[in-house]
Amino acid sequence: RPIASPPHRPTTKKKDWCGPCRMIAPVFEELSRSPEYAHIKFIKLDTERAPAVAKQLKIKVMPTFVFLKHGEQVGYVLGASEKSLRQGLDADGKVGLCNQLCVVS
């Protein structure tokens, strides 16, 4: 079942104990306020409070940025890379990038 969403949405799951998540959080906040990306809705997902959504999006590592368009996943970025996050935003979410050692079970 598709997840309801506006046209293009990167989401991130953030954990307070996750160092890379804390590192990228200010960048995510800055991008979410940027006029350049005003057409994109940025959402933070607490996977402990919404495990069903995290499971549906197949989020297994942190941080994960998921790009949705019309409720369907069109891309993702694994890891705390500002460059990769910007690439995803600029490519209309059509990315599949892992910029750090990513362990996906």
Image (cartoon, helix red, strand yellow):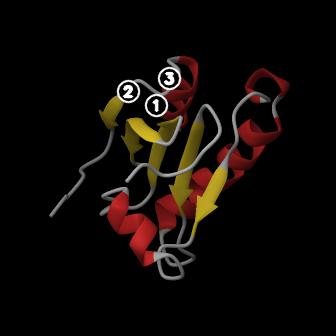
Foreground pick, 43 / 71: 71
Residue 86 in sight from this viewpoint? yes
Horizontal and vertical percent for residue 59?
35, 60
Secondary structure type for disc 1: helix
Q: Amino acid at mark 2?
A: Val
Residue behind mark 2: 95
Foreground pick, 33 / 55: 55
Residue behind mark 1: 84
Circle 1 packing at 10 Å, graded few (<14), some (14-19), many (20+), is many
Query: At 37% across and 27% down in the image, what residue appears?
Result: 95
Q: Rounded to the nearest whole Å, what is the CA distance between mark 1 and mark 3?
A: 5 Å
Query: At 40% across and 73% down in the image, what residue appears?
Result: 52
Residue behind mark 3: 87
Frontmost of labels 2 and 3 is 2
Mark 2 in CB contact with mark 1 (< 8 angstroms): yes
Query: At 40% across and 48% down in the image, what residue appears?
Result: 79
Horizontal and vertical percent for residue 13?
51, 62
Circle 2 packing at 10 Å, graded few (<14), some (14-19), many (20+), is some
For marks 2 and 3, the one nearer the N-term is 3
Secondary structure type for disc 3: helix
Q: Amino acid at mark 1?
A: Ser
Horizontal and vertical percent for residue 68?
50, 39
Foreground pick, 60 / 98: 60
Horizontal and vertical percent for residue 101?
24, 50
Q: Amino acid at mark 3?
A: Gln
